[in-house]
Amino acid sequence: MLVSAMFISLGFLAGCGKKAPPVPAAQPEPAPAAVAAADPEPEPEPEAAPAPSAGPSTNVDLQITLTRADGARHAGHVRLVERSTDWYGEEDWTSAASDVRLQVEGAGGESKAAWKDLRKLTVTIAKVSEASDCSYDSNYTPWMYDCTLRNLGQAVTTDGKTWTITDRYKWRLTFDDGSSEEFWLSKHPARQQDETAVGLDSVGENYDLYIGLQDRLREEAKTMVTGITVQP
């Protein structure tokens, strides 16, 4: 029994000897360093848009005498005739040859006369109380109010014919010295936008604005153009 015990003891001691160190787990390989993205090439700057070409500095060669209702006269050589792009003269001016022709009508129907073909223009100023049309435009917010005086303009052309001026645009004549004259030759408008938009509590049309616009027309009538003579 003693021998058996010794064998068991020796076997136990042999089993309790030093163990081999564990093999370390394989470490994952480091990911390759990210390659820095190359800076994008700068986009070329857009070329500057060409500046809009200025209108002509001259398009007529006329001697003109212009008279206003208060007796003021302006006579001299006109080098440039322009017309507004809208009836109210609020937007821009055009000097294109096809635009600066005066619209008239007569026995021969409607026509457009170049300024070199005009000899005399007369404007009879109407009475505001009798010949002003007032209305509002609800396409604007607040509404836009307009009163237009129906003046009678007539033109005599180089062929001796007399025409009624139906043109509603505003005109500008520029003289050699840089001075200019602006005017209408037929219907003369005055307009103004209301300060308050129409709402549930409003009463609709602003009649005070109509009165104010008619008063403006009476004041402007004192200096409206009444006559123009044209010489080539």
Image (tube, rainbow, N blue to C red):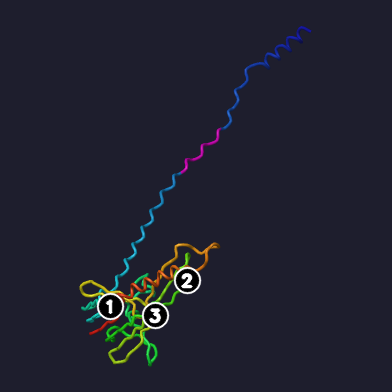
Q: Are discs 3 and 2 less than 8 Å apart at CB?
A: no
Real-space Cα separation, disc 3 to disc 1, in angstroms: 17 Å
- Residue 110, horizontal then vertical, whole percent: 39, 88
Please give the residue where the numbered disc 1 appears in the rendered image: 68
Horizontally, is 92 left or right of 140 in the view?
left
Q: Secondary structure at mark 2?
A: strand
Identify the image quadrant of the C terminus.
bottom left
Query: Is residue 28 on the magenta stretch?
Result: yes
Residue 157, by quadrant, is bottom left
Q: Amino acid at mark 2?
A: Asp
Query: Is residue 106 on the magenta stretch?
Result: no
Q: Earlier in the sequence, mark 2 or mark 1?
A: 1
Kindly identify which numbered label has been placed on residue 150: 3
Within-10-Å neighbours for mark 3: few <14, some 14–19, many 20+: many
Within-10-Å neighbours for mark 2: few <14, some 14–19, many 20+: few
Please give the residue where the numbered disc 2 appears in the rendered image: 137
Q: Are discs 3 and 1 less than 8 Å apart at CB?
A: no
Q: Earlier in the sequence, mark 3 or mark 1?
A: 1
Region rendered in magenta: 27-34
